[in-house]
Amino acid sequence: MWVLGLTGGIGSGKTTVSDLFAAHGIQVVDADVVARQSLDKGSPALEAVEARYGSQALQQDGSLNRAWLREKIFAEPEEKQWLNALTHPLIRKEMLKQLHAATSAYVILSAPLLLENKLTQFCDRVLVVDVTEATQRQRTQARDQVSAAQVEQIIAAQASRAERLAAADDVIDNNGAVSQLPAQVEKLHQQYLQRVAGSSK
Ligand code: ATP
């Protein structure tokens, strides 16, 4: 299976771009979705979380209290390490399973932390959605109603724009209007189909 890694910082437009590839019939494995599902109700990982923190980690209906856990691992780095050690192998296994199960011409692995978590090892090519940090801040705040300080913290914890561009095989410029994306996606999609047909990277 030929895998295209898709990445970009918070609010850069990964989902907007992967939806356009999906419209061409390309399947998308979203690391964020897999990560969320790894702690779904009834999952072994959620049971481990409950065993460690008790019922305060859960909501009334037994599902994970994600806001509580976010606060917890933000405040206590060693708890973040524990959670990552618990979930990362599960997330990786599930992502690989979904990548192998894909039936489209090629498959996209979309992950905000593709570089940071070294998921590039599973990718034949890396596509970066590029925006300026100013655009990132503005779009993320408009979408998530989060504080400027929170956005700043997330940006600081992710790879820099320069690091991402250095790792990119291809770049989509998303500083302009959404209407400028389909043509860029179409062009890359045709290139990827050719690469897959020729089996070159
Ligand atoms: P995250 O990693 O934070 O989930 P993302 O990289 O998947 O984000 P999107 O959710 O696709 O990014 O885009 C972030 C926000 O910016 C969304 O509200 C989206 O509708 C908006 N957006 C994306 N591209 C553009 C654009 N070119 N012009 C204006 N708004 C845009």
Image (spheres, helix red, strand yellow):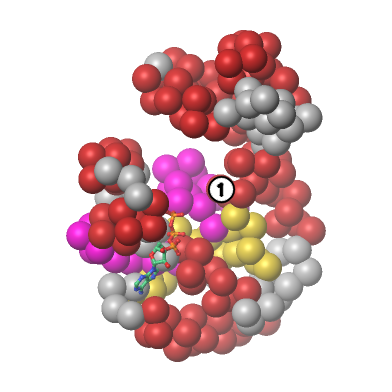
Q: Position of residue 180 (x, y in %)?
A: 38, 84
Amino acid type, mark 1: Asp
Task: Please give the name of the residue rendered at 29% of the width and 40% of the height, measured from the top-left corner.
Answer: 150
- Of residues 69 and 55, the one drawn nearer to the viewer in this rendering: 55
- Of residues 175 and 108, the one drawn nearer to the viewer in this rendering: 175
Q: Which residues are magenta?
A: 110-136
Q: As drawn, is 9 to the left or to the right of 87?
A: left
Residue sitting at the far left: 134
Q: Position of residue 129 (x, y in %)?
A: 39, 66
Q: As drawn, is 130 to the left or to the right of 182?
A: left
Task: Please give the name of the residue rendered at 23% of the width and 40% of the height, measured from the top-left corner.
Answer: 149
| Residue assigned mark 1 | 32
Q: Position of residue 18 (x, y in %)?
A: 54, 69
Above or below, 56 against 190 in this view is above
Examine the image and state in which quarter residue 135 appears.
bottom left
Residue sitting at the far front: 60
Q: Quadrant of the N terminus?
A: bottom right
Magenta stretch containing residue 26, yes or no? no
Q: Is residue 51 visible?
A: yes
Secondary structure of the residue carrying numbered label 1: helix
Above or below, 4 against 189 in this view is above
Q: How many marks?
A: 1
* Dot 1 beta carbon under 8 Å from ligand 1: yes
Q: Quadrant of ligand 1?
A: bottom left
Task: Please give the name of the residue rendered at 67% of the width and 41% of the height, measured from the top-left corner.
Answer: 37
Above or below, 38 against 138 in this view is above
Magenta stretch containing residue 122, yes or no? yes
Examine the image and state in which quarter residue 40 appears.
top right
Q: Position of residue 106 (x, y in %)?
A: 67, 71
Task: Please give the name of the residue rendered at 45% of the width and 51% of the height, measured from the top-left corner.
Answer: 112
